[in-house]
Amino acid sequence: MRSESTYVKMKWYIVLLCLSVCGFCSIAWGSGAVAGDSSFRGGQYSYDLPRVANGVMLTSNLWVWEDVSANAKFMEAQGAYEQGLFSTLQGVFASYGFTSSAYWFRIAIYNTQDTSRDLILSVPKPLLDSVDVYCQMNQGRTYYYPLGEQTDFDRRRLKVRHYAVPLTLSGESGAECYFRVVTTSNLTMNLEVSDVDSFLEGESVDQWMSGLFYGIAFSILVGIGILYIVMRDPIHLYYIVHFIGGLGYSSLADGSLSSLWSFLDVENFAAVFFIACWMIGALLFAIELLSIKKRYYRLYQGMLGAIASLLFLLVLYPWASELQTTKAMVNMVSGYTFLLLGVGFFCVFRKDHQALFFIAGWGGVSVAMGFAQLAATGVVSDAGFTTTGIKVGWAIEVVVFSFVLGIGLKLMKRRERDFRRGMVTAQDENSEKSQFLAKMSHEIRTPMSGILGLTELLETTPLSSAQKRYLKAIQDSGKSMMNVVNGVLDVSKIEAGKATLKKVPIDVNALLLDCLTVFEMAARKKQLPLIIVVEAGTPLTVMGDPERIRQIIINLLSNALKFTTVGRVTLSISMTDQILDEHLVLKIEVKDTGIGIGDQDKARLFLPFSQIENARLINDEGTGLGLMICRQIVGLMNGDIGVHSEPGKGSVFWFTVPFEVLEDCMLSDTEQVIELLEYEEKIRAILNTPIQDNNTHSSRILESYAFERQLKPKLEPMAEAELGFESRLPESLLKSRILIAEDNEINCKVITGYLERMGMKADVVNNGQEALDKFQKDGMQYDLVLMDCEMPILDGFSATVALHKWQDDTAQPKTPVVALSAHVTEVYIQRSQEVGMLMHVSKPLSYQRLFDAVTDVLGSKVF
């Protein structure tokens, strides 16, 4: 009921917003220039000053001439007026949009009083590039005043935020003034005249109001910044970008920081930059506030496209026409403003109550922006009203959105409080559950121990065939129940945070062989080859918990053999390109050619007590806890686990775990493949060992890694082809200088080891910037650079571009660069070609592939 009431109230707010638009319209159309009395003296029209001049608008009394070439001088402008080329304004507005022409405005003022008057002529629109003022007193001396954004602030006659010039008229005398205006922004001309005292009084009030406005705005900005630091919610960061853009543009529009922008000489770019920031921040804020990405993905893509277009214009600005770029930016921002308002209404109709707050805040800005566009086309007046309107609309938006962000902080604190309460309750409940499970485990294990013990004794007595079947059923049921109990206790222990991890050296080859040996007999019965694959570059000794790793692998192998009847089961290990807290991340996979898994089963595969539907077809009696335990163990090790599978095409279960690698550990220099059943006869023949009847320990032949390295060349003839390359390398190739850019220490050892095997030496750097420094600062010359693509400070792609550019600039030949990357997709290969890399070699590396790359690039062949 409460949310519905809020919804109704916000609807009424929108109605009031529409009424305010109507009021805005009436004020805007009624805010024309204040007409004064004109008279005809000396063959020309002049404006008769009132007795008190306090911001009197002279716009409707202006005469205007468009200088299309923008080259006319003051004397030419006077001649144009005398020739009748000047015309009066068509209406009360002087707005010409974005134009490359120069516009000349003429005004004649007459002091009807018999006493002298000190006046100020001002142009209350600071966003004009060049405003040149020529004032002729009583057809005598002419005074020149250079004004505008591109004029040094110190050259202004009056150091105020508006473009203002002093004017002294003696009694019953007049002055004729010409204003030449050129700008890349919307060309709008307003002219005011005030007595000096009135002008200074108005400036004082304006400065006070401006200080109040920016003081409050800065305080809000600081508050939002603190919210972002506390909450780390990107919505606050997006709003900060929007807020800074709004403040920056306001300071340009009202001239508050004219001296600063003039000193920096970035007025035009600053205007475009701040407008873009204001809109980009608003788009990102709306995406986050209204959950656009999650709820309306196509709309999200469209809004990202809008952001990209704004960024493109910013990048294009230094090389394109300032006039056209500014015009495009203003028009795009205006369009996106109404787009965002439409997004808000769209979400409202989808019953998103947060969108009501968005409309409430953004509505005023949209109205003000709409009238700013109308003013740019001359439909309504821009007598300072639209600038003020944008400020007012933006102020309303800031108040509403700040209120929304404040509510977010309050909700976050409430959620945090509820979370803490929930954590206390969960800890209490978990403690009670652990105690209950421990007690139940004891109560179940005691009688079950007796049952299994008695069945084992009974098995030694004379039994009939039927009795043996019944006894086996009892044993299998008892073991299954114990597996369930052990699984539940294991899960409970991990969830309670009582599980600990060891940190001891692990012989990777021995661990994998040991896991495979467990299933050797089961594989023989199904005649399934068991294969181990150790990818090149894999550390062979790591620090970790071998028992936990073994538990995961055995569980995955058990499932693979269970659901595979033909084909093979492969256990593989490789090193990824990830580093977590200075630990290398290894990936272990179990691949089978079994029945596969459907999408519905994959979604619940790692949940407790869940099994795939096809398990019924093979009478699987598993507990459904194995994969859940694997997931929790992997999570305990800060790793990840998953599956790739399709029905009928087998499955690949994988998990990644970060390991500490010893400094002197050996690496697998080539891909190692061990197939127990396939190579058994070859192994025995080599060892001259007679085949034994008991085959359960045949795989132990391969347990020694050192012995395995001696054995592989005899089993794999191709390995022999790799031997002896060093002796056949040409002398010219051996003298080549090679630079390795690689941030992974283990990979560096692999690559340098390969090169030393070829008879070469190389220098090693850790990132792209160090590689550049080798050339640019140290003056080194290399014949080849082996460049990793992803490195800190400067990646390989950027380093290659910078290196080749520097060599072009210094008239040096380009050094060939070979990309080394763990990415094998077409996108990365194409990118390496685009930046000038001659070859893309994917990781993990092998000796043969690196040898081929080096010899091909350096132009030598080995035969």
Image (cartoon, rainbow, N blue to C red):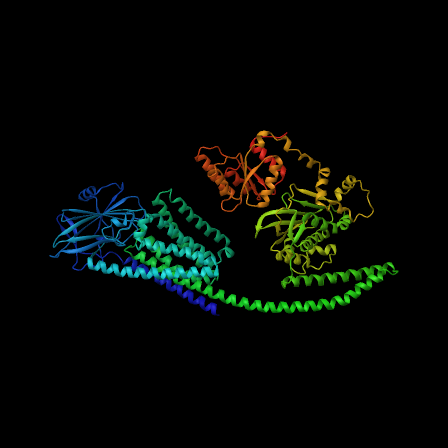
Q: Quadrant of the C terminus?
A: top right
Picture coordinates of residue 800, whole percent (x, y): 50, 39
Residue plotted at (46% across, 33% down): 812
Picture coordinates of residue 133, whole percent (x, y): 22, 48
Residue 201 found in image quarter: bottom left
Position of 533 with respect to 524 (left or right) is left
Front-most of residues 134 and 361: 134
Front-most of residues 548 and 364: 548
Q: Is residue 330 visible?
A: yes
Residue 736 found in image quarter: top right
Picture coordinates of residue 263, whole percent (x, y): 31, 49
Front-most of residues 243 and 533: 533
Residue ranking furthest to the left: 114
Q: Is residue 645 visible?
A: no
Residue plotted at (55% across, 45% down): 743
Q: How many labels does the image show?
A: 0
Look at the picture and state if 810 lies above or below 111: above
Picture coordinates of residue 660, whole percent (x, y): 61, 51
Residue 686 found in image quarter: top right
Front-most of residues 792 and 105: 792
Look at the picture and state if 181 lies above or below 498: above
